Image (cartoon, rainbow, N blue to C red):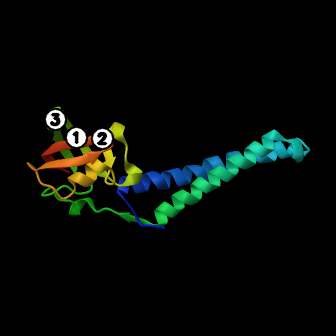
């Protein structure tokens, strides 16, 4: 599995989800299985089948989260600078066609959340901005076509 870069915040969020699945969800599902098993014939017991399926899905999710933690490399925010656009920067850009200004924080894939203004470093816009400086204009190919942006501000 590939290395997953994440912030301390993202790392702690995954640890909290693992804790919740292990301490709350796993016992709930185990109780559902035991309750369904007590109802008799397992061959035609839909509740038992549903509980076993939920258990399988939860355990798969738990394994995936643990893999992310095992392969995590934390990003040291103290090493992030604002001379050029890089991961963990907050970047204000202007669409030169529409004159609309937007601000995004460039984050690892797992932490992207457009509602919070966080976009993955692997999106076309983020890739096009990486390594650029304030004042630079850049053409970026996005699914809707070629867009021209100007970098207004880089901050942390």
Residue drawn at point x = 33 percent, y = 43 percent? 143
Towards the viewer: 40 or 57: 57
Residue 32 appears in the figure: no
Residue drawn at point x = 91 percent, y = 43 percent? 40
**Residue 71 placement: quadrant:** bottom left
Residue drawn at point x = 12 percent, y = 54 percent? 133
Say above or below: 140 vs 87: above
Residue 99 in the image: x percent, y percent?
14, 33
Say above or below: 59 vs 95: below
Mark 2 in CB contact with mark 3 (< 8 angstroms): no
Report the residue marked by disc 1: 103
Report the residue marked by disc 2: 117
First along the sequence among labels 1 and 3: 3
Report the residue marked by disc 3: 97
**Residue 75 placement: quadrant:** bottom left
Residue drawn at point x = 56 percent, y = 49 percent? 20
Relative side of 75 to 72, left or right: left
Mark 1 in CB contact with mark 2 (< 8 angstroms): yes
Say above or below: 118 vs 115: below
Mark 1 in CB contact with mark 3 (< 8 angstroms): no
Q: CA distance from mark 1 to mark 3?
A: 16 Å
Q: Tell me the mark number nearer the camera, choosing from 1 and 3.
A: 3
Relative side of 137 to 127, left or right: left
First along the sequence among labels 1 and 2: 1
> On residue 126, which mark appears?
none
Towards the viewer: 127 or 59: 127
Q: Few, some or many C-alpha atoms within 10 Å of disc 3 (few <14, some 14-19, many ≥20)?
A: few
Q: Few, some or many C-alpha atoms within 10 Å of disc 2 (few <14, some 14-19, many ≥20)?
A: some
Q: Tell me the mark number nearer the camera, choosing from 2 and 3.
A: 3
Q: Secondary structure at mark 3?
A: loop
First along the sequence among labels 2 and 3: 3
């Amino acid at each position: 599995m590939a290395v997953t870069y994440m912030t301390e915040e993202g790392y702690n969020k995954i640890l909290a989800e693992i804790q919740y699945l292990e301490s709350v969800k796993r016992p709930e599902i185990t109780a559902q299985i035991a309750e369904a098993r007590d109802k008799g014939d397992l061959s035609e017991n839909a509740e038992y089948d549903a509980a076993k399926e939920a258990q399988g899905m939860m355990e798969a999710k738990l394994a995936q989260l643990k893999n992310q933690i095992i392969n995590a490399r934390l990003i040291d925010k103290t090493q992030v600078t604002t001379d050029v656009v890089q991961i963990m920067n907050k970047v204000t850009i202007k669409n030169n066609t529409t004159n609309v200004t937007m601000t995004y924080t460039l984050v690892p894939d797992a932490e992207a959340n457009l509602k919070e203004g966080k976009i993955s470093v692997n999106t076309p816009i983020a890739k096009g901005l990486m390594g650029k400086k304030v004042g630079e204009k850049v053409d970026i190919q996005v699914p809707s076509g070629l867009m021209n942006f100007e970098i207004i501000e880089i901050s942390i």
